[in-house]
Image (spheres, grey):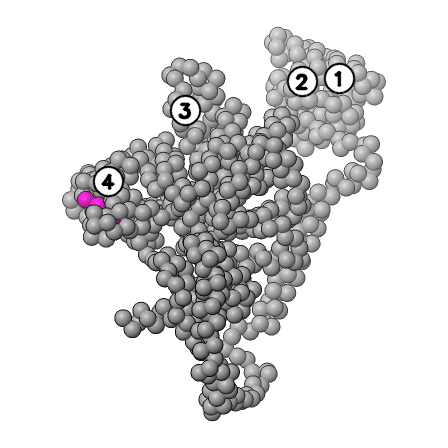
Amino acid sequence: MQLDRVTAEIRPRSDWEAVDLGFAMVRRSFWRCIAVWWLALGVPMALAGCLLWQYPLVFLVVFWWCKPVGSRMVLFEISRRLFGEEPGWRAIWREIPRAWVRRFFYRLLWARFSPWLPVTMAVEDLEGLRGKLYQQRCGQVVRRGEGVVMWLYLISDIAAAWLGLGILGLLMMLIPEGQASAWQLAVESWDPEVPWDLPEIITRTVVGCVIVGMSLTDAFVTGGGFGVYINNRTWIEGWDVELAFRRMAQRLGKGAVLVISLFMVCQFARAEEVRMPHEVIQEVKADEAFKVHTVTDKVPKNSSGSGLPVEWVGTLMQLFAICAVVLLVGGIGWVIWKNRHLFLMGSRGGKEPLPAPKARVVLGMEVAADSLPVDVPSAAWALWRQGRHQEALGLLYRGAISRVIESGGVEIQESDTEGDCLRRVEKVGAAVHPGYFRGITGAWSQLAYAGVSPRDEQVEALCREWPFGEGRGG
Amino acid sequence: MSAHEKLDTLQAVELAEGIEIRLRMAGPMLRAGAYSLDLLIRSTALTVGGVIVSFAGIAIGERVAGGVMLLAWFLLDWLYPVVFEAGKRGATPGKRILGLRVVQATGSPITFGQAVVRNFLRFIDGMPFFTYGFGLTSCLATRRFQRLGDLAAGTVVIYDRVVSPQARVPPPPLTAVPLPVGLTADELRGLALFRERAGLWSEGRRAEIADQAAVLSGATGEVGVNRLMAMAHWIQEKRRER
């Protein structure tokens, strides 16, 4: 670092002025800053973009996460420019891999959310400090302008999104009428009732705009942080005074040295003749006012002072922690209990899938066992004798279906037709009496669809031959 | 590199009398903060006014009340900054809270016409879609952080409140040493600053800085520091005598 080659006016500034100086630094080499930002992030992010083409939002998060690499390059550019260097493209190219790997775990994982990032990065990259020294130095550097840096950090992401929307708006303003058919279609397909379900083209465009906004904001935020850093060092290291002295030395030149030193020797010799300073000091210190008095004041230890009861707070925090743990464990237990069937199934090795729920309604008729009388054939025959033929046969058919589902295990679905039911029954085989089922299906279909009522004997036979147990009456 | 090209947040303005003043230009961050504060103040005023007018609406009729509200909104939106900035303090309440002020590029207070131009062009600065993208771009692209309205009206926003540096003044040296050679104003200022701010620096750093002026003090290290202090003290005493 050569202070006399500095290319900005060094003076102690207020915090916001320091940020403005940083902005001005970025403005001066704006295109180079943007270029190095994209050079550092472009290729890896293009790869990531290909991989995450289907998940633009994930891509945006990844991009945001890797942003400090770009900031590092911007910092590299403006810091060298400040001290009169212009890094060539080769130097920049060599710096990029370093920007990626330098303290990767610290910067990109551990301290990624540090609100002092714009300033501490300068300590890390430019001073090259690590470990305890780094911590110490950061503590020193954020002392001035801490609030400003936190504002910068907080605003940066909001501003990026905001700027992204601005860019999107600008693009939409610039698209000629009728040219944006794909975009138009996408906008029309967007349903305002489910605003989060955006068409892909819109999501991708928005993400792209936000990324461009991010690159612009990040360059300036990095500049602002660097401005604060420079201002801080100006304050605590007196850069401006040093520069003023250097200019003075240059003006006075070497010739003056001899004259001045001669003058000084005379001056101090005279001064010392008059009085030796340490004698004066001794004299002054002998005064009563300089005597050190000691007063010991004992404060009883167990008195509750006016301050916060620290132990209480500690106990309270412990209580909170215990409550949190109990709640967590209880919550996990509850979730396990609620989902215990998953584990039970797992213990059975998953070989026995859960039985599919049985159909309760087939052909629009209730077939659940509890909706039917216990003795189906007798009930049906009684109805038939009353002349309610449709109901009688319906009950009989319903009962038959119910019984083949319940006892025969035939998988009849709610959408099945009579033909489907018959086919399923026949497939299962003799256990469910397919012959009888065919007969009753035929009788029912004839009555229901053709309006042909079967003869009394036929119905009586059907009731009598009821093969499904539970009351063989007639 | 000459001093001319050096980057600075101050802008020197030469007045007619040959006096140079420096304006401390304010950047976009604090100005955005002032704008948000103004927005807050305006919307609070509108809300309170709205409640009052809606109560009055029972008496004067709902449509009249609606009309009054719209009118108030319009006037507040367009005239609030104009009236305040053309006023004595040259700042809207938000700007005043944050210590900002609008002045002409020459440093004199702005005229009513300038306030009108500056604030009516807000509409352009607010594009696209009220994101203030144009204004921000213009602000960051110009040397004096001017948005389009500022450029058109020839105005700038400056920091009005001078923050006094809270330097710890070290104890005065016992001796006062007269300057061996005549110094320029800039160099005298450097000496005074050295004395004022030395309390902020570590001892090693103090010696380092003093070594740069070894030509003047004729010594390095601790001795040099003490001599420079003594000289600064001498200058101050001379000034006090005058």
Report the mark closest to the observer, 2 or 3. 3
Label 4, secondary structure: give it. helix
Q: Give the x, y percent position of residue A362.
A: 65, 22
Q: Which residues are magenta?
A: B107-111
Q: Earlier in the sequence, mark 2 or mark 3?
A: 3
| Chain of the residue that carries numbered disc 2 in the rendered image | A
Q: Is residue A442 magenta?
A: no
- Which residue is more in the foreground, B29 or A280? A280
Task: From the viewer's perspective, tell me whether residue A33 is left or right of residue B190.
Answer: right
Task: From the viewer's perspective, tell me whether residue A57 is left or right of residue A27.
Answer: right
Q: Quadrant of the N terminus of chain B?
A: top left
Q: Which amino acid does the dot numbered 3 rest on?
A: Met
- Which residue is more in the foreground, A293 or A205? A293
Mark count: 4
Residue under label 1: A424
Residue A408 is drawn in which quadrant?
top right
Residue under label 2: A416
